[in-house]
Amino acid sequence: MLIVAENINIRNTKIGTSMRERNSEPIIELAKSLKDAGANYLDINIGPGTKGGPELIKWLVTSIQEKVDIPLCLDTKNIEAMKAGLEVHKGRAIINSTDGSEEQMNKVMPLAKEFNAAIIGLTLDESGIPRDENERFQIAFNIMTKATEYGISPEDLYIDPIILPVSGMQDQVNYAIESIKMFSQLSDPPPKTIVGLSNISQSSPPELRSLLNRTLLIMLACNGLSAAIADSLDKELMTVLKTYDILTNKVLYAHSYLD
């Protein structure tokens, strides 16, 4: 499974300060740790990026990729900043993200096509959070249809069923799982799937968060999940994922498989 590390986020006090001060050292140190822990991509979240977004994301992308050989998932609502980040990115980026609204898809999908980037599609639209798996499927269908109009292959599209906190919306967990199964019926080949894993444990006590995250990850993996935006520094989560890969014959068994 592809793991996109969630940790380089402007809302993190230390990382946010480093971004604002253009101090790359703590960010590079974290990026190296995330890659060493097993991350395949790093999510670079600058938030709305309303003030100096294009310059900030260019600095971030360049600084990280000069020191760490890893592709990035660019995470901002600022379209100009997204374009600026894609312009300097080495290798194939992931755009995080578009929702299912016509306005947003028509802004973001041309960038995915222009820069040959993969793109995450959130199953949200003007109506808000979908109520069940059927509404998620309809939004996913709309996203895939629009992607096809722009010449984006389903294999370059990651559909996110939207994970909501179990502490407040417990019934939504099963709807998300059912959605993952249904998305495989959208096309042949089908789009990939991705979740913001840590959303499941928001507002839960700290001692429960890792348990909730890793349990859901395996439940989703068993139902076809392709990727997760998660904390690759969570050793228990990464250990469970490695064990899942062994037990499902994705990786050749060795006694040292956790090393």
Image: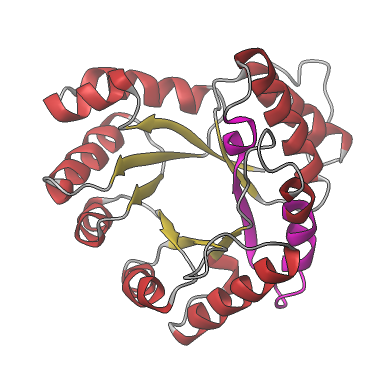
From the top left corner, tell me how far across and down residue 3 is, in percent.
58, 39
From the top left corner, tell me how far across and down residue 183 is, in percent.
72, 67
Residue 4 visible at all: yes
Residue 190 visible at all: no
Q: Tell me the residue at 64%/57% (across/down).
A: 161
Say left or right for 52 vs 163: left
Q: Tell me the residue at 21%/54% (across/down).
A: 81
Say left or right for 179 vs 231: right
User: Height in image: 21 above or below 2?
Assistant: above
Q: Tell me the residue at 57%/76% (across/down).
A: 144
Q: Tell me the residue at 35%/40% (across/down).
A: 44
Residue 181 sits inside the magenta stretch: yes
Quadrant including the C terminus = top right
User: Height in image: 26 above or below 201?
Assistant: above
User: Height in image: 256 above or below 54?
Assistant: above
Say left or right for 37 vs 91: right
Q: In terms of image quadrants, where is residue 188?
A: bottom right
Residue 109 sits inside the magenta stretch: no
Query: Start and end of the magenta stretch?
Result: 176-202
